[in-house]
Structures are given as structure tokens and as C-alpha cells.
């Protein structure tokens, strides 16, 4: 298994890139795929990648909001965020004194 390290800001950028790449891929499929079956299958794949990236980004944003609420309330910092199963570093969020 490949161990990757992500921080919260890079995760947001990666998911935006995945959504943008999915849209570009969708346009390429519609332009160059010849058969209807190929277009439909590749269309489903491109839309699936876009939706998956969007939901992962939304989950990371919700996790970051929860971590911010915990730090503002002064409770112990217990939130862990994941992006496609990989741990996301929340080092940008610090405990308030």
C-alpha cells in the first residue's frame, strides 16, 4: 500500500482537479467516442468520478468545520479526516489558548 500524506488545503485542490478532469474527460468522450454504448459507458465513468470527488470534498469540508468547532469550544481535538481512505493532516488547525 502506498502511504500518502495530505493536508486539508491540498485535498481541496486535488478534488477540484478531479472534478475538472472529469468534466474535460466528459467533453472528450462526447467528441471522439464513436458508438453510443462507448459514449454511455464512458459518460457514466466520468460523471461517477466527478460525483465521487465532490462528495469526498464535501466530507473533508464538514470534517474541517467540526475540527474548527472543537478548537473554538476548547474541547480536546479528536477529529480525524480521510480523503479516499487516506488520512488528512489538520496541522493548520491549532488549539486556542
Image (cartoon, rainbow, N blue to C red):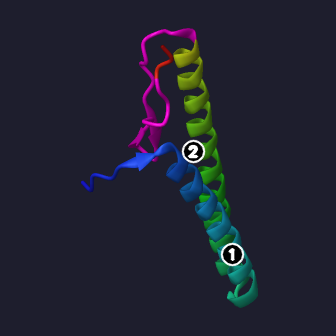
Q: Quadrant of residue 18?
A: bottom right
Where is residue 84? Give x, y as percent: 46, 47
Q: Main secondary structure of the magenta part?
A: loop
Residue lying farthest to the left in this orientation: 1
Where is residue 89? Give x, y as percent: 41, 39
> Which numbered disc flags the more N-terminal residue, 1 or 2?
1
What residue is at 35 percent from the left and 49 percent from the top?
A: 5
31 above or below 51?
below
Q: Quadrant of the N terminus?
A: bottom left
In the foreground, 91 or 20: 91
Q: Quadrant of residue 44?
A: bottom right
Report which residue position mark 2 lands on. Answer: 56
Report which residue position mark 1 lands on. Answer: 24
Where is residue 8? Give x, y as percent: 51, 43
Q: Is label 2 in a helix, a strand or a loop?
A: helix
Q: Is label 1 in a helix, a strand or a loop?
A: helix
In the rendering, which numbered label is found on residue 74?
none
Estimate the spatial distance between the alpha carbons at disc 1 and disc 2, rounded to whole Å. 19 Å
What residue is at 54 percent from the left and 58 percent from the top?
A: 14
77 above or below 23?
above
83 above or below 42?
above
In the foreground, 83 or 7: 7
Amino acid at each position: 500500500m502506498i502511504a500518502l500524506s495530505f493536508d486539508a488545503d491540498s485535498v481541496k485542490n486535488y478534488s477540484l482537479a478531479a472534478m475538472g478532469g472529469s468534466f474535460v474527460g466528459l467533453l472528450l468522450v462526447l467528441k471522439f467516442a464513436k458508438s453510443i454504448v462507448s459514449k454511455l459507458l464512458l459518460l457514466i465513468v466520468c460523471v461517477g468520478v466527478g460525483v465521487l470527488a465532490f462528495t469526498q470534498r464535501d466530507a473533508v469540508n464538514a470534517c474541517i468545520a467540526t475540527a474548527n468547532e472543537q478548537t473554538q469550544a476548547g474541547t480536546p481535538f479528536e477529529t480525524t479526516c480521510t480523503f479516499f481512505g487516506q488520512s488528512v493532516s489538520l496541522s493548520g488547525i491549532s488549539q486556542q489558548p
